[in-house]
Structure formats: structure tokens, C-alpha cells
Amino acid sequence: MEPHPNALYTRAADLHIARAAIERLEENHPNPSAFRHTLHKQPDTATRIGAIMGMSSALADIVIVHPELVGSVDERIDARLEVPEYAEEREQIDALRLAYYRRLIAIAATDLVHDYPEDYVSDVARALADLAGHTLDAATGMARRFVPESERIDFAIIAMGKTGAAELNYISDVDVIYVAQPRDAQTSEEESARIGAAMATWISHAVSAPGPVPALWELDANLRPEGKNGPLVRTVASHKAYYDRWAQPWEFQALLKARPIAGDLALADAYMAQMWPMVWDVANRDGFVESVRRMRERVEAHVPRARANRQLKLGAGGLRDIEFTVQLLQLVHGRTDESLRVRGTIEAIGALVHGGYIGREAGGRLEEHYRFLRLLEHRIQLQRLRRSHEVPPVGSLGRIAASMGMDAPELERRWQKVRADVRELHTAIFYHPLLPSLASLDADNVVLEEAAAGERLAAIGFRDPARALRNLHALSSGLSRTAVIQRHVLPAMIGWMAEAVEPDHGLNAFRDVSERLGSTSWYMRLLRDSAVVAPRLAHVLSTSRYVAQMLPTLPDAILWFDDDDLLAPRHRADMVSELDALMKRRSDPRDQAMAGRYLRRREMLRMAIGQVLRAVSPEQVREALSDVMDLAVSAALRAAVGDNPLGLRHAVIALGRLGGREIGYVSDADLMFVYEAPDGVSDDDAYREAQRVTTDTLAFLKTAGAEPAIDADIKLRPEGKHGAITRSVSSYLAYYERWGETWERQALLRARFCAGDEDMAKRWTDGISTFRYPPAGLSPQQIRDIRILKTRMENERLPRGTDPSRHVKLGRGGLTDVEWTIQLSQLTYAGRNENLQQTNTIGAIHNATECGLIDLDSARKLTSAWKHASLIRDLNFLATGKTGTTVDIMPDDPHTLRLIAAIAGKPETESHDIPETYLRDSRRARTVTNKLFYEEN
């Protein structure tokens, strides 16, 4: 066989990969001799083929399977997308994809042989975005052929993100928004949305679904109003209404990239006429700049720490840093300077430099770095046509580096240098202290001298003095009475915050509260005139992230800081009356149920503030949280029952920690549902209605909404998750008498009335009395069953990799050890001793001691460990604001321990004692569990 010409490999990033791919292509080519002739007689074509084969394994595979595409390497990157028409849907989709890959190969070939690829990168990105647009436009035309009734609507696709900005990658989600409009009066908006959704779904299938020809990319419509939860397709008017009323600042920022790309252009233009002006009004919205900054910080936080240093897009000094910086400046200054109203990043940098918003030197560096990073991104993705923004380790950079005209170590050095410089530029521009003032168009009336204030803030413990200064400027700028009072209060507030663990969080939250209440006269008077509100507020906001997060949502709660009586748990009867009033004012069942969740959120915050200020005890907190959980369940049940057409009686039984009235901030609600039907209602009708009520009640508790959802669980019902979700009183009693297992007896030890018909619930609890408190106690086999189950839980439920000694719930000497120990005593003796018939854990331990079943020393050890473990869970939550299983683990990082110490009223210097104290208590409790539960000597 004739050797390949030298020109074939002059631009091949990897010679061996290129040679192997070309040999496969030659074998699969329908006319190998013609192909070899091309390689020898057309050196430019040969170079382009070699560049593709030596760089992109994915494109090489496609060309090998479809050798007719190889000729596209010589085509212009802006050539038309030509798709032949087929009658069959599958053939039509395959033709569309092959036409797409033909154009993609032309773009990649031209890109890979360019002498100055960094200078050319924006042309490539624009060509890729245009190709995506032409493909979607062609797919839209096909959808009109294959989707029924499509002739009844106008339909347009708006590109967002990189596609809208004409700076697309080789492989990326294509962000879109769909718009549809009826073409005639006979078609309603609902029908238009339905047909439009069918067209959008067909188009998405055409470009994204698996098939004989590989899928192109994912179509992502999550930037639409309401995201994944919103309608897939809306009219222009519906879009406008959403953005007028509900949209967040980041959603307007996303619209900066919006561009008509496919479908009916008149409809797309109508959409843009409504949306585009909104983009440039967003900087007038309160808190715009801070919102954008927080979004940037959230994006960084989502990057896995282990991979952050190799992240090209989201990591420090990456593409997103440049894009955020540029977009913020556009949005702030583009209100009055229309020359900045452009979509592409490179184009925007040029406009900002030309307008004097960025210096020429800084702008030049930004553009140079952006071109380099985008080229590196293109090369990473081009290898396998996979969406990746992670830079491989230097040992795997060879092919990418060669395609960029350098070796791997040189590429690594340049990337690291660019990252550092981008971050420096990003920090200098994005966090510029003048931006908040510019965003509100207020005069910058700074009271504190900036350099001195920044140095002092850093010296007294603020981790981000620049942000602290911005907050201080926002709080103190202006001539209003509010600003004047803030200037008087702030110096002392800063000092109090500096004494706490997290002064940055405190100042951020204080600013948030002040912006919500700053124009309220009572708030400013309270700060100025009360001797305790300001110092207490500074301490709490700088100590508890939970309170710092939640207080701005209930700013009236600041009144509680002035009076310890207002921090005490409210009487249950008063809360019941308030719930009644709230529910009467609401007609929608969901809103009625939400009233209970609102009360729970409010009272959780009350207890949190009280606990941080040590105005309430942990015991008071647990009882108050249990009471308000009962009320939330009651509201959901009442909303679900509604008019009660069949006249059923319903009740909810609390079990677990809720049954013991000892829940914490993150406890779930273990529940059981029971009903009774009046005479004349059939069993089937009664059960269906009771099942509906149960299902609706759980949904009202769990479903996301304006108030925090409640994790309600019914797994402790008869037969567990396989059992009926509700039963009649007689059904429960019959089940327990005939089928009840030992674990079900144990689950019922903490059963008590929670919500609904209390008289019926009492009949239920009276009926199960002999089952949960067996007169003869437990048999030896039943005791063995409990011990086996406990051992299995210890082995299976503890999260893998967790130190058992540090898990306060399931670990050694934790909550479960203590609870199962006393519950075994109750199951054994409560049938003969009513004093043990107690649902509360600590109360049961106390009574068992009084009865002589547990010695005083053991009781003290169990009680101390249980209280300590419960307190650690609560303090973990208050300190960090986190939920889930993390609160069950004793922290070991010094910062969180300092927060916990502060909430517990201990000096920071003693924070390291907290784990040791708990570990000592839990070891002692485990010894008692081994003695009393496992009967080990």
C-alpha cells in the first residue's frame, strides 16, 4: 500500500491516533483508491483530515461510519445547512443529524488548521451557535410536518446562554425558551401551549434522543419561567406577566443572552420587544448587585472541592469569573449606555473598554484570557465530544496542548498564570465598592474612611472586609433618617459582632433585615433606644447561621429581642386560637395547611433565638417544637378533611420522638392515621375517604411551598411500608391482637394523640394498651428479637465511613442506645407498673429509677448522654443551618465547634472540650446499655 503523504499529519495532534483512525477510514471507505488519491493530490484536504483524525476521536468515529462526510473538511464554516426531505420520521431525523455533523466537521477542520486559533476562537464559537440555530430551525420545520395541529400556532425558539450569545462550545447544552401563539381565534392559549409543547418535545427528541446517528446535544429549557416546574411553552403575554411579577434578578441577567434563533421570527421579535428592555432595568431593583454576587458564590460552592483546582469554567479564575464580571458591568452601566447592550462576552469587553468602564490594559487582559480559556475548553471537548470543563492533569494534556501549538507543561503553566490573573481582575472589578451606589443611582455618601475601615474590620475578625465595607456603605449612605440612625448604631454593632464567631454573617444578615425594615419607624427606634436589642441582635446574627438565614424572612421577630417573655414558648391554647383564625381567613385547603407550617416556622425561629440567647432551656425547646409540630399536622389534617361529606372521624397518632414530645429542629414526624365511620357508611367508602384524607394530609405537610416542608413518615404503621396507610380503630386492634410483632409493640410505646378527634384517639390508645404494655412482659424469644434488631440497626443504618463514637443518634451511647434501653424495660414491666407507661424518654428513665428497675447512677448516665446527644443535634443545626444527617455527627472542625460553644454559652477557648465531654458521656451510656439491654457483665 502506498504510504500516506506527509501533509496528512502536519496538524495531527496525536500522530498514532491519527494514523490508526485514517487506516480504519480507508478500510471502510466505499472507494479506497479515490480516497488515497485525494490524500496524495490535495495536500490541504489531507492536512484537514489528519487534523480531525488526530484530535477528535468522536468525529473520527462518525466519519469512519459515514465516510461520505469526509469531504466536508474543505467546506466553509458558514456554509448552509442542507437537509434532504424524507417522508419517514426516523429517516428525516437521521438526515438532520448527518447534515449537522457535516457542518461540524467543516468547522472543526478549519479550527484545527488555523495558524492563530486564539484569534479565531470567537469565529468558531459563532459558527457553532449559528449551526445550532440552523439545526433547530430545520427541526422546527420538520416538527410542523410531523406534529398534528402545528399549523394552528406560531412557534419560535429563543436561544439563551452561550447559544444566544453566539459563543457556543463544541458540545454543550443548548439553552432555549419556547414561545407559541394561536394563529386564529378558534385556538385558545391552552391549546396553543399544548401544541407548542408537542412541537418542543418533538424537536428535543430529534436532536437529543438516542438513534442510529449519534445525538447532537441536550436541549435545556430550564431557564424558562418557573424553571422545571413551569409550563414548557408560554405565550409572549404569559412570559411578560411572569417577569413583571415574579422573576428574580438572575432571571433578568439570563435574558441578557436571549436571541431569536428558530421558528417564526415575527413571534420571536415580539418576544424580544417585551423582554429586552427588562434586562436593562434590573439594576434598579433593590439588592440587585448583592443578588448577583451571591449567585456567583453559590456557583463556586457547587464545584466539588476535590476538582475545583482543575475546573476551567466554574473554578476560581475560570470562564465564569470573566463572564460574571462583564455581565455585571453591562447590567449596571447598560441602563444608560446602549452601546453595552450586546450579548457576546468578547464584544462586551470591547464595548466596556470603549466606554471607559474598563481600562484598556485590563480589558486587553480580560479578552486575551477569555480567548485562551475558550480555546482550551473547545479542545477539551473536541477530543470526545463530551461536555467537560475539567482540565486533565498535565500528563494527559499532550494531545490538547499539541492542537494549541505548545507542549503540555507549557500549557499547564499558562493556564495557571491565566487563572491567577483572571481572579485578580475579577475581584478588582466584580467587588468594586462603588457598584452598589451605581446600581441604585444614589450619591455615594461614605462616612467611614474606606482604607482605615477595611484594615480595622480585618483586624477584628471580619474575613471579608471588602464585603463588610460594602454592607456598611449600603447601611450608612444617604440623608434619610434611617441612614442617620444607622450611622450612630453601626460602630457599636460592629464591635459586638466582632466578639462573635462569624461577624461577616452577622453584618450581612443585619443589612438584610435593615433593608426590609429600614423605613419602619419602630425598628429604628428599637435599635436606638433599647439597651438590649442591638447587642443581642449582633450576637445572634453572628453566632447562628440558621437565625441569620431565617430572621430576614420574619423581620418582625426582632421585637422578641427586647423582652424575654416574648422568647418563651407560647401557650398551646393561644396557638390553637391563632391557627383557627388563620385557617378561617383562607379558603384553599393548601393555604389552610400552609398556615400550620407558617406557625411552625415562626415558633422554630422563636425557640432558636431564645436558645442562642439562653432564654429558654433545651427541654422547653423540645416541648415547644413538639407542640407546634402537632399544630402543623392538625392544620394539614383539617384542610384534608374539608367538609367531611361522609362524617368520618379522623385522628393522627404521634410516635417516635414526636410522640415523646421531645423532637428537635430537624426531627421528622412519625405518624399513624386512624378513622371511624358513622353508621350507614360502607367499609369500602369509609376506607377510600380515609385513604384520601391521609394522602392529602401527608401531601400538605411534605409538598414544597412558601413554608418549609415537613418530613412526615408513616413507616411505623402495621406491616410497615407494605401496610395500609390508615385503618379503622377496630382494624388496628384486630391486627395487633392477631398479627402484631415485637417491633410494633416497641413502636407504640411512644404513641399519643396528635391531631383530629381526641375522643376517638383515646379509644384507640385504650385499645392498644395491653398490646404495648403486655401484662406478662416479653418472652425470652421476644427479647432476643429486639436485641437482634438493635444489633442489625447498628451494623446497617450507620452511614458508611462514619465513626460510631461520633454519631449522636445511631452511634455508641447515642440516642438510640438510650431509648432502646429504657423501652426494653417498659415492654418488660409497664404492663404491671403504670408508672412506666410514659411516652417521654427522660420521664420513663426517671420513673424506672423510682420503681427500682434502674439504679440511680445508670439513670444519670443514660439521661446525661441522651440530653447531650439531643443538644448536639440542635446546636449543630443552629450553628450551621444545615439539615439532614450531618446534624447527627459530632463536628470536628474548629470553626463549627466555636459556633457550638458560643451557642452553648461556653468560651471559644473551651470549644475543643465539647467533643471530649460528649464522648465521655456516650461511653458511659454505652456501658449501661451493654449491662441493661444486652445483659453483658
Image (tube, helix red, strand yellow):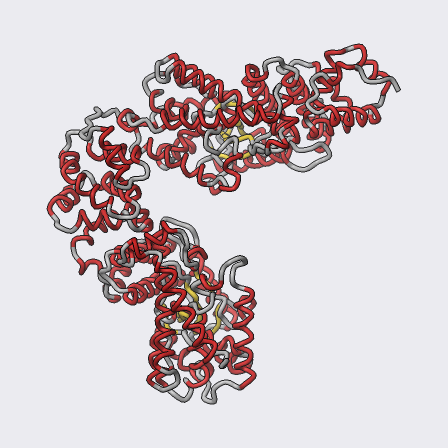
Task: Pick out the residue farthest to the right.
Answer: 1
Q: Is residue 274 visible?
A: no
Q: Residue at x 30, y 43 (%)?
A: 505
Q: Is residue 801 above or below residue 499?
A: below
**Which quadrant of the rendered structure holds the N terminus?**
top right
Q: Residue at x 21, y 41 (%)?
A: 494
Q: Is residue 346 above or below residue 588?
A: above
Q: Residue at x 39, y 35 (%)?
A: 242
Q: Give the left or right position of residue 224, taking residue 480 as reference.
A: right
Image location of residue 110, percent across then percent down: 65, 16
Image location of residue 103, percent across then percent down: 66, 20
Residue in the foreground of this view, choosing between 357 and 83: 357
Image location of residue 297, percent across then percent down: 40, 37
Residue in the foreground of this view, choosing between 93 and 98: 98
- Numbered disc total: 0
Q: Residue at x 26, y 62 (%)?
A: 575
Image location of residue 430, percent across then percent down: 37, 27
Dividing the picture into quarters, in which one does residue 59 lie? top right
Q: Give the left or right position of residue 711, taking residue 619 as reference.
A: right
Dividing the picture into quarters, in which one does residue 330 lie? top left
Q: Is residue 75 visible?
A: yes
